[in-house]
Amino acid sequence: MQPFYNEQQTMLATTVREFAAENLAPRADEVDEKEEFPIDQFRGLAELGLTGMTIPEEFGGSGGEYKDFMVVLEEVGAACGSTSTVLITHVSLGSQTIHHGGNDEQRQRWLPSLASGEKIAAFALTEPGTGSDALALETSLTRDGDEYVLNGSKLFCTNGAVADVFSVFTNHDKSAGHKGVTAVVVEKGTPGFTINPQHGKMGMKGCATAELVFDNCRIPVENRLGEEGEGYKLALKILDSSRIMIAAQCLGLAKGALDAAVSYSKQRVTFGKPIATRQAIQFMMADMAVELDAARLLTYRAAALYDEGLPHGKESAMAKLYASEAAGKIASKALQIHGGVGYFKPSAVERIYRDQRVTEIYEGTSEIQRLVISRAIIGDL
């Protein structure tokens, strides 16, 4: 680990690394091949208290800062991309939406069972006709007495096929623009709520992606997070902070690829010598190490700003943009170092290469990150 991690974080990294080596890495290929939600691995993370990280102890969480969670996700991501996506979605999207958007009664109702890992959280924003345009939500929310009626659908919902608690963003008044967006919590099993698993992804195959369909789905008004019209602001707040964790995940993917490349280069012999002795290979690995450390520094800065309660939107976007694209470069070079062996299954770099690609798309594409950064630099025009 890097010297800017304190002793506690270094010990945390060691604990998670050992757990990941024993419980995550050996199953990563199987999870990917079978598109199987890693429930045993998730329970193991819960036993370590990792499913409750960044959630206050008063609501059943294990606390900790975003810098701590960053350390965890790097180690988890290095072993299994799918499991890291599951953990990010559960903690920094689903659970944190309830923590930041809910009142104390709602936090006490949902967070303890999520923090313990007894239940699984999901975050539902993207729709069939939307993506980067979060204001174009078609999922409608209509009040009927003490209930809301939901109609519409969500797409690409990570953890969706197995989740128990969903933070759902809806539109209660399309004419009001961003002030028409409202967030609600919908629980699995609610009448009118159907979950359709989605298959065929390029990578991150184990994170149980699903389509959510709401057909006159009724939920209590008390399931609303905040006031009507506060959903868009809440979504942006959650995405700003969760992008730090996507960056941390990318550190893990990149670390896994670099470690695999170093190990293989020492074993693979050509013309009588390990390829690690070849300057071309050495230079490639040097570039990979520089990219990884630069991404780690950007991610740490964003996490530190968040922990201090300081503005971090631009820095989160920078970390996510740089780390995701750096992970792509590192995975590509790792595969090149492996040659044909890396192109076939079961190869860790083949899986990492596929898993990494979505990190430049979800929670804001690279283009959206560039918009966020440029607008922060330029300011109002």
Image (tube, rainbow, N blue to C red):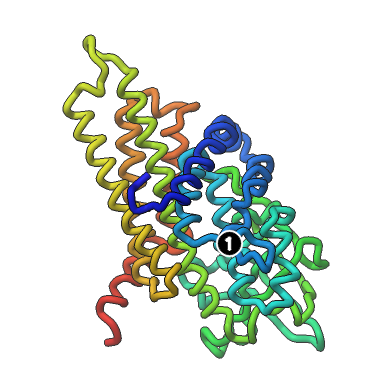
Badge 1: how crowded within 10 Å, few (<14), some, or many (20+)? some
Which amino acid type is marked by label 1?
A: Gly
| Residue found at the far top of this picture | 272
Residue at 77 percent across and 72 percent down: it is: 217
Front residue of this view, candidates 171 and 42:
42
Compared with 375, 40 (above or below) is above
Q: Name the image quarter holding residue 247.
A: bottom left
Compared with 164, 368 (above or below) is below
Residue at 41 percent across and 33 percent down: it is: 349
- Which quadrant would the C terminus be assigned to in this image? bottom left
Question: Residue 144, image x and y in percent?
Answer: 79, 86
Relative placement, left or right, of 156 versus 346 is right
Q: Is residue 367 at least partly visible in the picture?
A: no
Front residue of this view, candidates 231 and 57:
57
Residue at 63 percent across and 41 percent down: it is: 41
Q: Name the image quarter holding residue 165.
A: bottom right
- Which quadrant would the N terminus be assigned to in this image? top left
Relative placement, left or right, of 226 versus 261 is right
Q: Is residue 377 at least partly visible in the picture?
A: yes
Front residue of this view, candidates 293 and 121:
293
Question: Residue 5, image x and y in percent?
Answer: 39, 52
Q: Secondary structure at mark 1?
A: loop
Relative placement, left or right, of 22 versus 367 is right
Question: Residue 358, image x and y in percent?
Answer: 45, 51
Residue at 26 percent across and 35 percent down: it is: 285
Compared with 96, 325 (above or below) is above
Q: How many marks?
A: 1
Compared with 70, 261 (above or below) is above
Question: Residue 300, image x and y in percent?
Answer: 37, 58
The residue carrying mark 1 is 63
Relative placement, left or right, of 361 versus 111 is left
